[in-house]
Structures are given as C-alpha cells and as structure tokens.
Amino acid sequence: MSPEFPTPGSVRSAAEVNEQIRALWLRAGGTLSAQERAEYELLVVQWAAAIRGEVIEAA
C-alpha cells in the first residue's frame, strides 16, 4: 500500500502526516516490512517539512 502524497505545492499539516505515520505503525503491528519501512521514511521526510513550514509560518 503506497502513501497518499499531496500534489506539488499543496501542504499537509504535521498533524495530518503524523496521523498517517501512526496508522502505518498500527497496520504493521509494530514491525515494518521493507515496503512499509520505505513508506515510513517518506512520511517522516514529509512530517519534517511540515514542521519546518509551521515553524517558519509561526515566526
């Protein structure tokens, strides 16, 4: 199952991405397969970008 990625230029909040990360871990039962690990890594990158965007916006 591949993660849903926003179209270029659209931004999801860190909370939305975090929810996807939590759902992935729940589906995986706490142990990620190689495919799930790749999905997780992409979600973490998206989450970090969202956090940076929120911090810059708040400043």
Image (tube, helix red, strand yellow):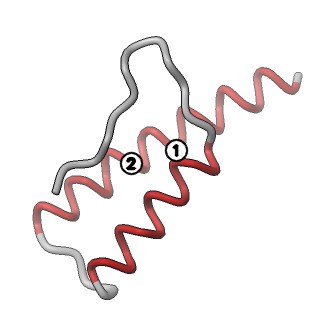
- Vertical position of residue 8 compared to residue 44: above or below: above
Image position, residue 42 (x, y; %): 31, 45
Answer left or right for 27 relative to 2.
right
The amino acid on which the numbered mark 2 sits, given as a three-letter code, is Leu
Image position, residue 25 (x, y; %): 37, 75
Q: Which mark is residue 43?
A: 2
Residue at 52% across / 44% down in the picture? 47
Q: Which residue is mark 1?
A: 47
Image quarter where the N terminus lies is bottom left
Answer left or right for 49 relative to 6.
right
Q: Residue furthest right?
A: 59
The amino acid on which the numbered mark 1 sits, given as a three-letter code, is Trp
Q: Nearer the viewer, residue 51 or 25?
A: 25
Which type of secondary structure does the marked residue at label 2 adopt?
A: helix
Q: Residue furthest left?
A: 34
10 Å neighbourhood of mark 1: few (<14), some, or many (≥20)? Answer: many
Measure the C-alpha gap from mark 1 to mark 2: 6 Å
Residue at 20% across / 54% down in the picture? 38
- Vertical position of residue 53 compared to residue 36: above or below: above
Image position, residue 15 (x, y; %): 64, 51
Q: Are marks 1 and 2 in contact (CB under 8 Å)?
A: yes
Image position, residue 30 (x, y; %): 33, 86
Q: Residue furthest bottom?
A: 29
Which type of secondary structure does the marked residue at label 1 adopt?
A: helix
Image quarter where the C terminus lies is top right
